[in-house]
Image (cartoon, coloured by chain):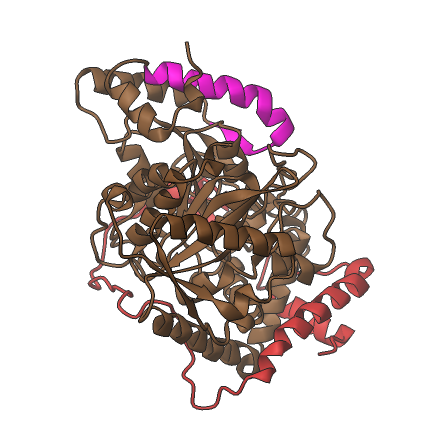
Chain colours: A brown, B red
Amino acid sequence: MTDLTNLSLEDQIEGLSLKRFSSVELTNSYLKKIEKQNKVLNCFISINENALDEAKKSDLKIAKNDKGIMEGIPVAHKDIFCIKDQVTTCGSKMLENFVSPYSSTVYEKLFNSGTINLGKTNMDEFAMGSSNETSFFGNVLNPIDPERVPGGSSGGSASAVAAKLCSFATGTDTGGSIRQPAAFCGITGIKPTYGRVSRWGMIAFASSLDQGGIFARSALDASIALESISGFDEKDSTSINKKAPSFYNEAKRDDDNHVVGIPKNIIENIKDAKVKTNFYESVKILEKAGVSFKEIDLSNIEYSLPVYYVIAPAECSANLSRYDGVRFGYRCENPKDLEDLYERSRAEGFGDEVKKRILIGTYCLSAGYYDAYYIKAQKIRNLIKESFVNAFKDVSSIMMPTCANVSFKLNSIQNPVEMYEQDIYTIPANLAGLPAISIPSGKINDLPLGIQFIGNYLNEGNILNLSNKFQQNTNFHNE
Amino acid sequence: MKISEEILDNISSLSKIKIDEKIKPKLISDLESILEMVEEMNKIDTSNIEPMSHPIDEAKNLREDIAAKEIKRDDYQKSAPLIDDGFYLTPKVIE
């Protein structure tokens, strides 16, 4: 029998539906691989012990033809999505024993689509990191080269999809946490428009930037999964009240109207010549497929990194104030008074990177510095959004590399700013709230590279279509 | 921006995170390098520009303000480190 884990999501849906194999067989194939490979990769924090029971139920539903659109498909969830009565750690000692009293909308939607939860994936603590080295549960390794990082913060999900330990996986992207690990692991990762996917039950890092999304092995697979998690949710006040179209149909349809913007000021400044060459080779592939290109100017985009490192820490310092050692989460031993309880619970419960960001955020919001840092950053954020709005008057999407480099070796980046620069090309889409996708575009020394398409608001269909076009003409996503 | 030990102690107190003396020098150097990068922002003139707090204008749905009877205290307190009879316990605050 063929290895079922090699099949695409599309083929798995068809195979299950035509009863060529059962969900129990499919789920078992994944669980066996996870048992073997997770010891090395460390991409799962917890495995769902009920996965096979869920698969049995799905098989019954398929037999009765009473099935969800992804009935019986085994998936993995970033451990930032709450699942009722299951531990949700967010990669932190602070939530090591936190059992969620409710489920996130993303999980509920995927459960209602019929998916089987294989387990929760490892991540940088509270989604703060670009290498998955800040997780309390240990670093994750990249299946392409186990001496290297999978990227972050959703490194566990990316590593699991790349190693074929799940059909697809959920992730979150605040400044690149889906796209950068997708690029490092040679898979497809999409962050939809801010507000497209409900943030209910998705543990908050920076609320005006956080957005849930999908890791998959192709744009078509991603389009099916993304459709399932999208849509209005009255429980999230920032959810957009618009029905999501069929992303799968949008990705597949013939679209000859792509005009892709190339931001000259960014591309000219790519430092690594191989990354630049790969970018232009990718342009050529699309040109041959009939896609038009146009040079654009995204002014002020070079300020994205500083703006992000004010806004994200500021929002993080407010969001993470809820972890006080009183209502839930870690509590220090023998506090001598209330102040000591707060200060030591947070000092012992949070890791170094999280503490650093809370301190930066607190500083930027403190009296005397608020205008100079926080308001200043918000003003530049407005200018960056305006640059995108202007660009989309002339183009249907924008293309740039996902990262400035390929995956790096474990513990090789010690300087915080150098680590933050990992997200230099991914942050702008979060600041503006735009949808963006990373797809594999080739390799440098056997390590995958990604290209990124940024779409206009609510136009995920366009960048999925463009990505599918690229993948129909290349084989990088199957290598 | 130079971060003095006094500033670090102030933000540590504001954020309720106790900082170990031993890590202070490294932490100060990290914070300074982050702020140095952040201060690139000063190169751009932003007078007459409105601050943007949220990427999407049309969102922000508010629900009706209706009192609900749903109380799931026991469910929510299952994750609490220390409770007694429905109350969260902390060290004594008032003598």
Q: Is residue A376 left or right of residue A55?
A: right
**Over which residues does the magenta segment extend?**
A22-47
As displayed, is residue A68 above or below residue A124? above
> Would residue B82 be visible to someone looking at this image?
no
A42 within the magenta span: yes
Q: Quadrant of residue A25?
A: top left
Q: Is residue A450 left or right of residue A219?
A: right
The tally of labels here is: 0
A422 within the magenta span: no
Q: Main secondary structure of the magenta part?
A: helix
Which is more toward the observer, A471 or A54?
A471
Who's the residue at 35% across and 57% down the image?
Answer: A193
Q: Position of residue A125 (x, y in %)?
A: 58, 48
Which is more toward the observer, A325 or A320?
A320
As displayed, is residue A415 above or below residue A445? below
Who's the residue at 56% across and 61% down the image?
Answer: A424
Q: Position of residue A171 (x, y in %)?
A: 45, 44
Residue at the front extreme? A288
The quadrant of the picture occupied by the N terminus of chain A is: top left
Q: Quadrant of residue B31?
A: bottom right
Residue at the bottom extreme? B48
Residue at the left extreme? A65
Who's the residue at 41% across and 20% down the image?
Answer: A27
Q: Position of residue A247 (x, y in %)?
A: 27, 45
Who's the residue at 49% across and 28% down the image?
Answer: A164
As displayed, is residue A97 above or below residue A18? below
Q: Position of residue A374 (x, y in %)?
A: 52, 76
Which is more toward the observer, A279 or B2?
A279
> Would residue A287 be visible to someone looking at this image?
yes
